[in-house]
Image (spheres, rainbow, N blue to C red):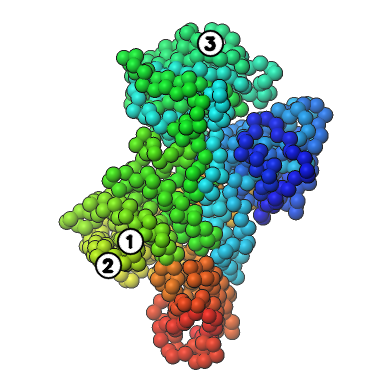
Amino acid sequence: MNPTCTTQTGNGKAPIYRTSSNPAVSTALSSGTRLFLPVAVATGSALVVPAVTKKAASFSLQGSNNVATLDYGREVAGYPYFVVSSLSKPVQLELKYTEPYDGLNHVNGDGPFYFASALSNTFRVETFNVTAAGRYQSYFIQGGQRWESITLLTEGSVTFSDAGLVATIDPVDLNNLPSQFNCSNDLYNSIWKLGAGAASAACVDAGSQSATWDITAEGAYIRGQKPGISALSSAFTNYTLSFETKIARGGTGWSVARNPTGTGYSLLLISNLPNATTFVNTNKTLTPPNTIVVSFGYGPLNQTTLPSFHLDNFPVPFDVLENKWYQIETSLNYKHLAVSIAGTQVFNVSLAKYTFEIAAGASFGGPMPSTGSFGFGPHQDQAALFSNVTVRAANNTQIYSNSLTSTDVLAEYGVGKNVETVCMDGAKRDRTVWLGDLFHTTRIIPASLSRSDYVTGTLRYLLDWQNFLGLLPIDPPLGYSATYSNQVGVYFGLQDYQILGLLAFTGYFDRTNDLTFAAEVFPAIQQQIAFLLSQVDSTTQLINIGGFLGPAFGSAVSGAFVEALHGAATVATALGNSTLALQYSNAASATAAGINAHLWNPTLGIYGISNSSLSDFSVAGLSFAITSGAASPHRATRALSALTNLTLSPGYKDSTRVNSSDRTANISPNTNGFLLSAAMMSNDTAPVKYLLDNLWAAMVTQNLYSTGASWEYVGQNLTPGLSLFTSLSHPWGGAPTYILPEYISGLRAATPGYKTWLVVPAYQGFGLAHAAASVETPSGQLSTSWQLSGRGRVLTVHVNAPAGTSGSLQLPGDRMIMKAVVNGKKSMSGSAIPLGGGMSTIVMRL
C-alpha cells in the first residue's frame, strides 16, 4: 500500500493558515508542493483499523463519533495538516502520530523523542484550537509515521475535506525505482523494498528540514520541543543563567548542565493555565499551574531507553501570567540548584537530595552533575518568547550574553535548517547522522534509489566534523554547524564505527566509481585510515579497537578492518596512487594472517570473538572474517555450520554471550545483514533463506507494524524489538535491498562502477522460478534476468549491458558450465562465460 502523493495547485485563493504556522510550510503550500495523503480513514467512538480505499473521502467528527484513524499505508514524513470545511462551534482537536498502530493507544503516541532536537517535533501528540473553517497545519515536522488519529476533545461537530502531510522527504514510488529487483516470490519483492523505503524516509534534501525557532525583534519564539542547547558553553560549570521569557501558552522551559544529545536538568515554569488559552487535554498532574517542574535525564517524560527522573515540583508564590515578561535566574553549582523569578526565590535545593534516586536508575549514577551547557524549549503544546540571556561564572564574571534576536543563534543552538543533503539514523527518532549505520545505507541507495547525492552529502557532512586525529564523530546532530565541532561535544567513541564508516565510503565507490568525489575526500579518508593503522598491534596484527561490533583484538573489528583496507586500496588504485594501494593491501594481508593465527579455533571451527575469548563467537565476527577474504573456503564453511549455536528465532543472536533463555533479547537486522553477504559469498543459501522467510518477513506480514521500511530491531515474538521506541524505518536493517539483486539475481560489480561486472544467478536454494535486477551505472542501465524451465533443468539468463562494459556469467560455486548457448551459438565450456555490452541470452542445460 502506497500513500497518495499529489501536487497542490491551489484554487486562485490564498490558503487560510491558522495556529503557529511555519513560514516555510506556508510558502510551500501557497506555491504548490507534494503531499502525502492517507490511503484510508475510519471514524468512530474509538480507534479502528480502517479498510483501505483508493482515496480517503471527507469525514466528520461529532458526539460519540469523535475519533478518526488515518492510515498512510507506509512510512511518510512531513508537516501534518488538515482542512476544516465546516464546524458548528470552536473545537479543540488532538492529533497523534505513530509508526506502529499500537502507538495510537498510548497517551504520548510512540514518543516523545528527547535524544536530539533533530529539526522535528519532539512530541507525537499536539493539540489544535479550531475556531473557523480553513487549513491548519503543524509548525513542526513529524519525522516518520504510518498512523495518525484525530480526536475531537470538545463539544460540537467538525467536517474535514482533507488531511495529510506536506512532504519533507522525497515521496518516491517504491514500485518504480531507478534500480530494481523482482522475482517469483512476492514476499521477497516486498522485502527488497524495505531498505529503499527506510532510506527514502531517512535521507533528506538540503534545506528541507526547517529551523525550529522563530527569531523576532523581541527574541526567540520557541514552541514545545526538546531544548535547543548552546554549543558555546559545554564546559560551563558552577554558573548562573539569567534570561527573560514571556509565556504565550501553557508555560516556558529551559535546561542546564546539559550537552546537545546528552542528559541534564529540565525545568518547566507552568503558567496559571487560564481557560482561554489552556487546552482541555493539558496534563495538570504533570504540569500543575504556577509551578516549576524539575526533572533530570533526557526530558520530563520517560520513553523506553531514554529514561528521565522527576525530581520535584516547586510552587511559585504568585500567579504566573501569560503574555507577561519575567526574568528567570537559575544558579547551579556542585551542591545546589536554585531558581528565582523576578527577584523572588522559588527554591534553593541541595542536589544531594536526589543523588540516591538518580543512582538507582540503570542509566545514571554518581553525584548530580553541575557542568554542561544550557538551552531553551517549553513542554508539549506550550510556547514562549526568550531573550536577553546572560551567564555569570561563580566569581560573578559575565561569560556569555545573547539577546536571541539574530538568526545566528539557530546554528549555535542546533535548531537551524539542515545545510547538507544527508541520510539520518532513522526517520522518526535519533534523527542524527550515525556514522556506522551508513554501512548498509550506502549499499542500499545504489541498488534502489540511485541518489548518489544522499551518500556524498552525508559523507561530506561527517568529514566536516573530522578531528585532528582523523576521527569522524559517530552521530553529529542536525541543526548544528560544523564550525562548532569543538564546542558541541560530538562523540568519537565506539571507534569501530570509524571502520564501518570507511566501509560505507568504499562500498559506495565499488558501486559507482565516483572518482570526482573520491578525489575530493580521499585526503581526509587517509587521515582516518592512518589513525586506524596506528591502532594495530605489532605482535598479533589485530586491531586494538572495540565498540559496537565487538571487543578489541576481535574477529569482527579486525575482519571489518581488513575489508575496509582492501576497499581503500581499490580507491587508491583508481586514483593512481599505487604506493598507497600497496601499503593498504599489505596491511590487510597482515591483519588477515593475524586473524587466522590468533582467532581461529580449530576445535570448534569458529573465529573467536577476541584473542582472549576463543570459545565465544559472533555473527559480525563470522561475517567479516568471510567477507574480508580472511577465511579460507573450508574455514568459512565450518564457521557457517556453527550458526546453529546462534539461532534465536526469528534470526541469529549477536553472539554466544547473549543468553538464549532471555526472552527480551532482540534480533538485529543490522548484524544479520552482514551475515547475508557472508553466507552468499560462501554459497550457503540456508541461513539467508531462513532470515528472509522469518526475520525480514516479520517486517512485511504484520499489518499493524509494517511501514514499508526496514526495522531497527525485531523481538523474538516478531514484534518491534524495543517496543514503541523501535524505529520502524531504519536503513541499517535494509540489507536485503542490495543482497537480493547482487546475489539472487546475481548482478555484481567486478570492478568499480560496473565497468566490468559479474552475473552469478542463485537459481537454487530459494525455490524461485525466476529473478531479475537492474542497476543504474555510470555507463547506463545494466540489467539481468534468469528463469528456470523444463522442470528446473534449463536455465535461461538474459543480460543487457551498456556499451563499453564487459563481464561474465558463472554458476554459483566452482561448477563448470558444460553446455551453454549464447545468442544462439554454442559456447566453449568453462567456469565462466565472457560477455560484452549489449543483449546476451544464455541457455544452459543443468
Which labelled disc corresponds to residue 316? 3
Q: Nearer the viewer, residue 482 or 697?
A: 482
Query: Label 1 to label 2, Cα distance in Å?
Result: 11 Å
1 or 3: mark nearer the eye: 1
3 or 2: mark nearer the eye: 2
Residue at image position (66%, 16%) is 274
Asked whether residue 798 appears in the rendered view, the answer is: yes
Task: Name the residue furthest left.
Answer: 539
Q: Circle 2 — which element?
A: helix
Which one is earlier in the sequence, the residue at label 1 or at label 2?
A: 1
Picture coordinates of residue 559, whole percent (x, y)? 31, 59
Query: Label 1 to label 3, Cα distance in Å?
Result: 62 Å
Picture coordinates of residue 165, whole percent (x, y)? 66, 43
Picture coordinates of residue 844, whole percent (x, y)? 51, 85
Q: In the rendered picture of this protein, how many numbered marks are placed on residues?
A: 3
Picture coordinates of residue 36, whole percent (x, y)? 67, 48
Which labelled disc corresponds to residue 568? 1
Query: Label 3 to label 2, Cα distance in Å?
Result: 71 Å
What amino acid is labelled 2 in the image?
Ser
**Relative to 557, is 47 above or below?**
above
- The residue labelled by disc 2 is 578
What amino acid is labelled 1 in the image?
Ala
How many residues crowd around disc 2 within 10 Å: few (fewer than 14), some, or many (20 or more)? some
Residue at image position (74%, 35%) is 16
Q: Is residue 321 left or right of residue 548?
A: right
Q: Is residue 302 left or right of residue 831?
A: right
Q: Circle 1 — which element?
A: helix
Which one is earlier in the sequence, the residue at label 3 or at label 2?
A: 3
